[in-house]
Image: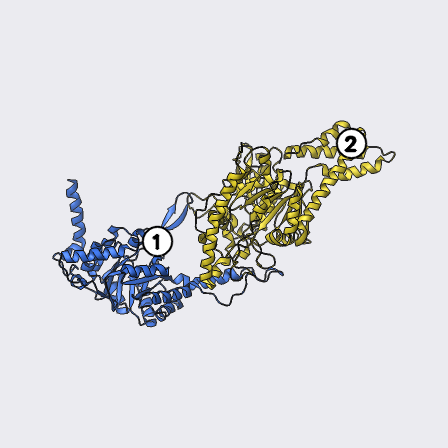
């Protein structure tokens, strides 16, 4: 029997198939099915900085605006003794998920600025999370804010969250850094135990009929794998930390490539949303089959075996690879 | 602007068409453009804001469909600081008021665009900024003008409708406006029926007196008055002229032998010879709950009254108590754990009579359907009931988004639009029309924009989920029931 186990963020996982932050983890019955289908860990859906900061304010606003405006209507709602705002609901859900499954559960916190909301990192840890994934995403629109300042903002945030929690901390990053290896090294030095590459974002689209901007979210496609694959291959031999590859993982082959590039785990959601939770078992089955056919004993054996340091042509992961791709196309055209 | 919508609550945005020559007297800064009304090809169009009466609700900006082609964030109307514009717009507004009103006669009222050229006789009310009720009342006064007689139940609409010594009901250039009075929660329908009976009795007595004094007053005039059709504004205007002539002849008649008293009496009743439009208006607390017995009685009477229920699904004026119109799962006072029973279906109860015109409307979702329902209800010679979705401060929403919420309510199937017109059945036509499409979005996409639902989700998530589930099921069942009813009622129609 091949050994599919892997170590990620100090956790021993039975295989490298982790469910990424997505609506899949919002319902307890689905979480149980994910475990039954073979998931080795689950990253819970994300709790957003905006939810923590704005939600209580918004609810309070809408429950109290208009009060004391008419003699006959001093208020418009009954007084309830207790409200569970989304952050509280999240923590309660995390506790329920932990109680429902035996596999590790990773909390997910999404934000960018320092502030009291980062206390929720500690609350997520107290609620029983085995690790925390911090999702860093900032869209820089201010021309006066340079890259150094933004990177410092990220680092400050990581240090602040690190100070709040003692459970393992992973950072989910965007691919938009000028010097990703340097940034990765600094983030690890600031306290990250792992890097999750890469975040995929809701992208604004334009509705031509309404002339409005609408957020869109597309499921990942197989070709999305290549970007994180390249960067994990480049980074895994240079910055020592645990890497998770997310985005574009749809088959056992994708998982194998991620492991060889140097990832400790792969994260899946789109494939499961599109084709059902049962795909996990099928991918695990294909993984074993491939390993047997190719005589691999364990996942650990292949991890990093094709990172930039290990391959015969390290330059293939750099600019030359791009040129060769162009040449290939040129040859075809000829 | 492509066209002005009727959805704005405070009548601070007006439009007129007028001859270009009148622009000669316009103050600096007054804006106009060629009319795009096919009925008025040679006239000039102006859309004018009353800058000092604007409440700043922002609803107009949300409702405005016309966006700037160079910067889509700007619309044909935008919220900006008032101070820099105040002086110019104040003089523009004052000039605008001097421009002639669009003549009602001959104007096709079935078009939204045209309806907004009509003078509203309900303006600048003290309702909440962005109120969802007042656009319906404003539209009634635009469509039926000074012929409107309103019996108003106690509630928000009686407070902003008669915040004495001021009133938002106003008069036209001739000094004519709607008649309005307020009665109690428990008897407003009967109060309005009394108005109907009084007008009918006055009309009956005037007709008797006309016949008795036909020789003195002129047989041709009397005959024309008694047989006037009065089916539209042109015909009604003609009747007004006849009544004015009648009064003049009475004044000119030499009094003798006891006719003086009777003719004097006829002069006092003569205005009742012009067709009146009786509207009984109130909220859901009145119509569904406290005044329901009376409402039912009035609908059963068969008399020609128009009932407009401004349904906020909660007692708004007294501070958000649950009514029988409150939907399943919404939190209100006396329903702090979310209302456990469904909303009463007032429309279906009224339809059961078979001879009551019934419409369910939501201006934010379909203003054309709203307009059609009001015109049909008024034209129907019998009782009419219009149930109007009215977003409210007690829903816990950003009031600028009130119209959007109305649209979502309809798209989710929480609020179906329909019209039942018994007159069509008498003519052998299909009387029942479902005016909204089958539900196209999940209920939660509508309800969780509102604090009245969110607060349950955040205080008792399990119960909220359970009630949402029930409510979602009920949406599908209601749609099926509506379609089955339509098939049954429209069977055999021409």
Q: Residue furthest top?
A: B220
- Using the image, determine if residue B127 lies above or below residue B140: below
Q: How far across and how far down the image is residue A204, in percent?
A: 36, 51
Where disc 1 sits, the SS reads loop
Q: Quadrant of the C terminus of chain A?
A: top left
Q: Which of B8 and B336 is in front in this view?
A: B336
Q: Nearer the viewer, residue A307 or B174?
A: A307
The yellow chain is B
Residue at mark 1: A202
- Per the rendering, the mark at residue B99 is none
Q: How far across and how far down the image is residue B32, in percent?
A: 53, 39
- Using the image, determine if residue B359 lies above or below residue A15: above
Does residue A99 appear to the left or right of B334 in the view shown?
Answer: left
Does residue A85 appear to the left or right of A233 in the view shown?
Answer: right
Q: How many marks?
A: 2
- At horizontal 74% and vertical 40% (from top left) the residue drawn is B201
Q: Which chain carries label 1?
A: A
- Using the image, determine if residue B308 lies above or below residue A261: above
Nearer to us: label 1 or label 2: 2
Residue at mark 2: B211
Find the distance from the CA under tag 1 to the CA under tag 2: 78 Å
Label 1 Cα neighbours within 10 Å, binned few <14 / some 14-19 / many ≥20: few
- Using the image, determine if residue B391 lies above or below residue A185: above
Q: Quadrant of the N terminus of chain A?
A: bottom left
The blue chain is A
Q: How far across and how far down the image is residue A148, in percent?
A: 30, 63
Badges 1 and 2, same chain: no
């Amino acid at each position: 029997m091949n050994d599919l186990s892997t170590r990620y963020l100090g956790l021993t996982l039975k295989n490298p198939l982790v469910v990424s932050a997505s609506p899949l983890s919002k319902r307890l019955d689905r979480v149980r099915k994910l475990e039954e289908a073979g998931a080795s860990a689950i990253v819970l859906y994300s709790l957003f900085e905006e939810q923590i900061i704005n939600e209580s304010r918004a609810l309070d606003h809408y429950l109290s605006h208009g009060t004391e405006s008419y003699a006959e209507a001093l208020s418009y709602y009954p007084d309830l003794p207790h409200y569970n705002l989304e952050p509280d609901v999240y923590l309660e859900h995390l506790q329920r998920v932990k109680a429902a499954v035996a596999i590790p559960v990773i909390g997910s916190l999404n934000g960018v600025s320092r502030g009291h909301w980062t206390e929720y990192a500690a609350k997520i840890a107290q609620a029983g999370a085995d690790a925390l994934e911090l999702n860093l995403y900032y869209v820089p629109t201010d021309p006066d804010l340079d890259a150094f300042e933004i990177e410092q903002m990220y680092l400050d945030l990581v240090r602040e969250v690190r100070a709040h929690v003692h459970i393992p901390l992973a950072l989910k990053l965007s691919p938009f850094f000028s010097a990703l290896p340097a940034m990765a090294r600094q983030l690890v030095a600031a306290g990250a135990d792992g890097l999750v590459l890469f975040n995929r974002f809701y992208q604004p689209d334009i509705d031509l009929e309404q002339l409005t901007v609408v957020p869109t979210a597309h499921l990942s496609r197989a070709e999305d794998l290549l970007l994180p694959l390249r960067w994990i291959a480049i980074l895994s031999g240079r910055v020592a930390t645990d890497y998770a590859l997310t985005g574009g993982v749809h088959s056992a082959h994708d998982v194998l490539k991620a492991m060889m590039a140097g990832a400790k785990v792969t994260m899946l959601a789109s494939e499961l949303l599109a084709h059902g939770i049962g795909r996990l078992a099928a991918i695990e089955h294909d993984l074993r089959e491939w390993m047997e056919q190719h005589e691999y004993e364990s996942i650990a054996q292949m991890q990093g075996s094709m990172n930039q340091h290990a391959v015969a042509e390290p330059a293939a992961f750099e600019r030359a690879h791009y040129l060769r791709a162009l040449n290939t196309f040129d040859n075809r055209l000829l | 602007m492509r066209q002005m919508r009727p959805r704005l609550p405070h009548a601070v945005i007006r439009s007129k068409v007028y001859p270009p020559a009148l622009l000669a007297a316009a103050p600096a800064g007054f804006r106009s453009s060629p009319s795009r009304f096919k009925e008025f090809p040679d006239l000039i169009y102006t859309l004018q804001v009353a800058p000092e009466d604007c409440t700043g609700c922002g609803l107009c900006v949300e409702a405005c469909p016309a966006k700037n082609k160079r910067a889509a964030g700007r619309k044909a109307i935008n919220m900006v600081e008032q101070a820099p514009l105040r002086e110019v717009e104040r003089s523009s507004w004052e000039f605008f008021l001097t421009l002639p009103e669009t003549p009602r006669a001959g104007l096709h009222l079935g078009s939204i665009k045209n309806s907004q050229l009509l003078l509203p006789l309900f303006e600048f009310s003290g309702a909440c900024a962005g109120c969802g009720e007042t656009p319906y009342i404003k539209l009634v006064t635009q469509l039926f003008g000074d012929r409107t007689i309103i019996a108003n139940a106690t509630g928000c609409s009686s407070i902003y409708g008669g915040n004495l010594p001021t009133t938002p009901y106003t008069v036209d250039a001739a000094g004519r406006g709607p008649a309005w009075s307020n009665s109690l929660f428990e008897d407003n329908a009967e109060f309005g029926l009394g108005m109907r009976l009084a007008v009918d009795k006055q009309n009956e007595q005037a007709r008797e007196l006309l016949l008795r004094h036909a020789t003195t007053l002129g047989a041709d005039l009397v005959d024309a008055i008694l047989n006037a059709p009065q089916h539209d504004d042109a015909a009604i205007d003609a009747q007004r002229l006849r009544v004015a002539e009648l009064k003049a002849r009475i004044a000119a008649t030499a009094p003798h032998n006891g006719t003086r008293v009777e003719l004097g009496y006829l002069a006092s009743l003569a205005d009742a010879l012009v067709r009146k439009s009786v509207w009984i208006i109130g909220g859901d607390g009145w119509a569904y709950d406290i005044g329901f017995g009376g409402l039912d009685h009035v609908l059963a009477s068969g008399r020609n009254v128009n009932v407009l229920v401004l349904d906020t699904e909660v007692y708004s004026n007294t501070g958000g108590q649950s009514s029988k119109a409150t939907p399943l799962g919404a939190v209100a006072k006396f329903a702090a754990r979310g209302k456990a029973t469904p909303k009463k279906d007032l429309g279906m109860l009224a339809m059961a009579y078979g001879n009551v015109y019934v419409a369910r409307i939501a201006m934010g979702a379909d203003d054309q359907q709203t307009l059609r329902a009001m015109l049909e209800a008024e034209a129907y010679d019998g009782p009419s009931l219009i149930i109007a979705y009215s977003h409210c401060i007690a829903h816990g929403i950003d009031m600028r988004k009130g119209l959007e919420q109305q649209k979502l309510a309809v798209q989710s199937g929480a609020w179906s639009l329909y019209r039942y017109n018994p007159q069509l059945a008498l003519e052998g036509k299909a009387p029942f029309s479902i005016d909204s499409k089958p539900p196209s979005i999940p209920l939660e996409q509508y309800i969780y924009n509102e604090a009245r639902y969110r607060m349950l989700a955040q205080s008792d998530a399990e119960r909220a989920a359970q009630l949402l589930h029930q409510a979602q099921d009920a949406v599908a069942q209601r749609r099926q029931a509506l379609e089955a009813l339509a098939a049954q009622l429209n069977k055999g129609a021409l």
